[in-house]
Image: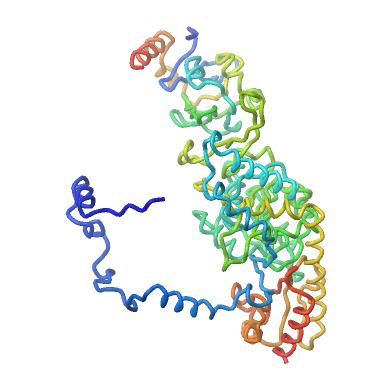
Amino acid sequence: MRYLPHTPDDVREMLDVIGVKSVDELFGSIPETLKLNRPMDLPTALPECRLRFELEKLASVNRDAGSMPCFAGAGIYNHYVPAAVGQLLLRSEFYTAYTPYQPEVSQGTLQAIFEYQTMMARYLAMEVSNASLYDGSTATAEAVGMALRIFKNKRPVVVIAGHVHPEYLDVVRSYLTHPEETLRLVPGGSDGRVDMAALDAAMGPEVSAILVQHPNFLGLLEDLARLRETATKHESLLVTTFSEALAFGLIKAPGAFGADIVVGEGQSFGMPVSFGGPLLGVMTTRKAHVRSMPGRVVGLTSDRHGNDAFCVTLSTREQHIRREKATSNICTNEGLCALSAAIYLSLLGNDGLSKLARLNHHASRHLAGRLAAIPGVSLPFGQSPWFNEFAVDLPISAAELCRRMADGGILAGVPLSRFEPGQERRLLVAVTELCSGSEIERYVAAFGAACA
Amino acid sequence: MHVPKYLKYSKDHEWANYDEEEGVVIVGITDYAQAKIGDITFVELPEEGDDTERGTSFAEIEHHKGVEEVYSPVSGKVFEINEALSESPELINQDPYEEGWLVKIEPGDLSELDEMMDAEEYEEYLSELQEED
């Protein structure tokens, strides 16, 4: 893309057209007291080679998952990204975040999205997938909006059951006009999972959906069969979200429990942790609800010669046609990230995914067992099933333990105090296939030393 | 363009017919409207019991290139919807005045129908539109 700067004449001409004297006048509504009115306090310019050196020095202060063993998760997981993923993404044909509208010139991109949708729908045992959304949190917010829309806002409440990622909930709240009235929170029980009695008490004819995260924010598996029963009893929808997509390589997919909408974060499938983005919002549902689903869908059709052809379908729900009545004001997708997921899943296949998920689970159980044997350390939810992430209670502050272990070259996990006050001694630990046996031994030793 | 004599018409190309036996106003879109829209792929109807307000949208008709709103010619309550349209939206294209009806409304105020056009006025209105085209 060319960069064409505006000449003073261009600027003058535009100002004349709109009848404004100067560019500053355009910012006239900003109160004087808020304006800086002096040059910004920046260091003097450096030559390129010096600047590069300075930036590298700054960057080297970071302690990241690429330079030390990483046991931090809480929504983003450090899985191995096969080299083929990055290499295929480099193809210039795919280098646009936008879904091309014209099928005549974009069969490759459209087919890639179609394959992604097929994989997601099959993996989650759902009927329809969209072409992707921004990330797990926005997908969750869109799912809440979708549930309300399915009932035409006649059931204005969504029950949030148990430990849903606090940052996802923040995004859900920011999407809603009256989050306090719309969301009804049912806290997790003493086992870290949904408190079924509290859930029953929260249900009613005004509830459009139960939203549950599975595996939940603490890494624990929820009882989706019972959640489905409860939802059905009240004629509500069951909406599930997830942040660790790999889990369903080992455990039964939410769709197999009859979930109506399944959303979540697809980062685990071929995307790096990369300081938290870009991510991949997964959204799937049942055919019956497809017209309430936001985002775009690529369909398979045939051209006039009878050959297979791909095109964007159901776009009548989208903003460029339906304006303010669109299913969402987000009418874009994470094309490149969706492609990563499609390549990643193709590389691993069913068996590969299943083996990888098992490896994660076993490594996680192994580490949890070793940590629980350290005096003063316990697993608060050790009796509940989990996938690859678990909470651990410490004799010292979790943030302090993380600092000490990072000094020793290990990212120990995510202190829960970051999300919930009063959880100062609770740490969330994620174990992936990238945590080797010897690293786990190192972790246990450093952990014991930090706690002693 | 077929314009049955016994119906009432709106400027948005809805037709209305008061069924005295059932005490309801049957509403659909006109032959002109279905021809303009082209192949109809989906119809979203209100639910039975929903309130309708004269002049506000109560249904959406989806076609290959977009979505059209259908405005209620009378205020009242939805008595019945044409369930057949969920499986066969093309009924509107094939038979807009009979099989392709949209909803039956229990009217709050029947005099609202008097403000609609009769067949003759609607035909005149259509010919004006065609001149503009």
Residue A59, x across and y down, in percent: 51, 76
In this rendering, the count of numbered labels is 0
Taking the spot 52% from the left edge, 54% from the top edge, the residue there is A176
Q: Position of residue A450 (x, y in %)?
A: 69, 89
Instruction: Name the image quarter holding the C terminus of chain A.
Output: bottom right
The way the protein has been coloured in the rendering is rainbow
Residue B107 to residue A207: above or below? above
Asked if residue A247 shows in the view, the reply is yes
Q: Residue at x 41, y 50 (%)?
A: A1
**Residue A365 in the image: x percent, y percent?**
81, 72
Give the image quarter of residue A287: top right
Residue B5, position as x, y percentages in the image: 48, 7
What residue appears at the point 54 percent right and 79 percent down from the top-left corner? Answer: A60
Toward the front, the furthest residue is: A49
State the residue in front, B51 or A279. A279
Left or right for A54, reference A137: left
In the rendered view, tell whether residue A125 sits above or below residue A303: below
Q: Nearer the viewer, residue B43 or A438?
A: A438
Q: Residue at x 70, y 46 (%)?
A: A260
Is residue A233 visible in this depiction of the protein?
no
Residue A34 versus residue B22: which sits nearer the camera? A34
Quadrant assignment, res A400: bottom right
Q: Is residue A345 above or below residue B26?
A: below
Q: Is residue A367 left or right of residue A113?
A: right
